[in-house]
Image (tube, rainbow, N blue to C red):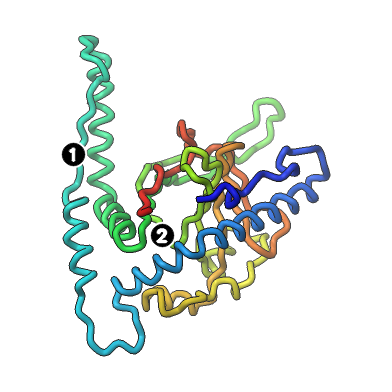
């Protein structure tokens, strides 16, 4: 990709002191502008991917005879790429005789075995491989699910009763992200990518359940521009007037910003929720060039 396609950071990104409301408004406007540029730069890729995906799904109005040649080819290639659940094998990096290292490796291996047994790892990885073979991009991401309950405690300084959130359960899992709901900074090399985003389509109830005080984003942006290039199930869900929310992972600041149109401030800003070395919740997505 040409260097001219790279979205440069504006001087406003440097975080100069300003009114918090004004800063929030500029933050939302900045990210919406970046996402719009990214969608324009990658428009040709998504159109080609949509055409290939429509053939795979047999979602081509007007066709009376269908021979699933592409579907069959993808299934054969999928089996060649991923056919069995991986078997964890964790060992110390070096041949250490220290039993502590061996015990730690065994704990990690058993944790991975438990995770593979308790989650839909095969389904998510299989869907990722199909996306890669049909649309040219497969995106798996890591998510941390936690169950939190509020308990009461006494503030040792004031003696007043306070609410303390307690984590009762949490699990890390891999989730498949549909190829058309992932965007990334247009760069020539993934190593130079400073931000990416995930697009979430929520009903009004789902949106208000999570952000009760926020404004509902407009729904007209949710209408798929090329209806002939999406599956019937996706089209049926699209008629529910869904609201788009953008989950942006900014590697430069190591923070996650969640925004939606119609709101002058981010819905959420979370600092490095996973604490991973490369920050992003996904590996560099496999792409067909």
Q: What label sits on residue 140 in the rendered view?
A: none
Give neighbour class at mark 1: few <14, some 14-19, many 20+ (Cα, 10 Å). Answer: few
**Disc 1 to disc 2: CB gap under 8 Å:** no
Identify the residue shown where x is 47% and y is 56%: 182
Give the vertical position of 101 relative to 189 (above or below). Answer: above
Furthest-right residue in this view: 19
Is residue 263 shown left or right of residue 64?
right
Residue 105 lies, with reference to residue 215, above or below; the image says above
As rendered, which of 69 and 234 lies closer to the eye?
Answer: 69
Answer whether residue 209 is visible to the viewer in this image: no
Residue that mark 1 sits on:
87
Relative side of 49 to 19, left or right: left
Residue drawn where x is 44% and y is 43% of the image: 281
- How many numbered tags mark residues here? 2
Instruction: Identify the residue at horizontal 74%, vertical 42% (top origin).
Output: 11
Q: Residue at x 34, y 89 (%)?
A: 62
Q: What element carries label 1?
A: loop
Any part of residue 213 in sight: yes
- Residue 216 pos. (x, y %): 64, 67
Image depth: mark 1 or mark 2 in front: 2
Disc 1/disc 2 C-alpha distance (Å): 27 Å
Question: Residue 132, how many percent across, how many down?
Answer: 32, 56
- Nearer the observer, 256 or 252: 252
* Residue 144 placement (x, y as % from top left): 43, 44
- In the rendering, at what x and y percent does residue 96 appear? 23, 11
Q: Which mark is residue 179?
A: 2
């Amino acid at each position: 990709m040409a260097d001219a396609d790279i979205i440069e950071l504006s001087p406003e990104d440097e975080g100069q002191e300003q009114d918090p409301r004004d800063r929030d408004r500029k933050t939302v406007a900045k990210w919406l502008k970046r996402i719009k540029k990214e969608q324009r730069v990658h428009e040709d890729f998504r159109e080609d991917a949509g055409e290939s995906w429509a053939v795979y799904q047999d979602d081509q109005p007007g066709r009376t005879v269908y021979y699933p040649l592409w579907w069959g080819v993808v299934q054969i290639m999928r089996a060649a790429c991923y056919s069995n659940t991986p078997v964890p094998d964790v060992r110390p990096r070096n041949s250490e005789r220290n039993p502590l290292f061996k015990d730690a490796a065994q704990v990690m291996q058993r944790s991975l075995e438990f995770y593979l047994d308790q989650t839909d790892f095969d389904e998510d990885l299989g869907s990722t491989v199909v996306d890669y073979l049909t649309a040219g991009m497969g995106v798996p991401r890591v998510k941390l699910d936690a169950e939190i309950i509020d308990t009461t405690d006494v503030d040792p300084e004031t003696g007043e009763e306070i609410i303390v959130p307690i984590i009762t359960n949490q699990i890390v899992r891999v989730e498949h992200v549909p190829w058309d709901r992932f965007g990334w900074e247009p760069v020539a090399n993934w190593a130079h990518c400073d931000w990416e985003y995930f697009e979430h389509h929520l009903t009004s109830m789902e949106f208000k359940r999570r952000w009760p005080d926020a404004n509902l984003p407009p729904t007209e942006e949710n209408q798929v521009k090329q209806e002939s290039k999406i599956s019937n199930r996706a089209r049926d869900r699209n008629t529910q007037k869904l609201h788009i929310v953008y989950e942006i992972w900014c590697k430069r600041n190591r923070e996650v910003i969640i925004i939606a149109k119609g709101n002058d401030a981010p819905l959420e800003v979370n600092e490095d929720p996973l604490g991973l070395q490369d920050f992003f919740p996904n590996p560099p997505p496999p792409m067909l060039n």
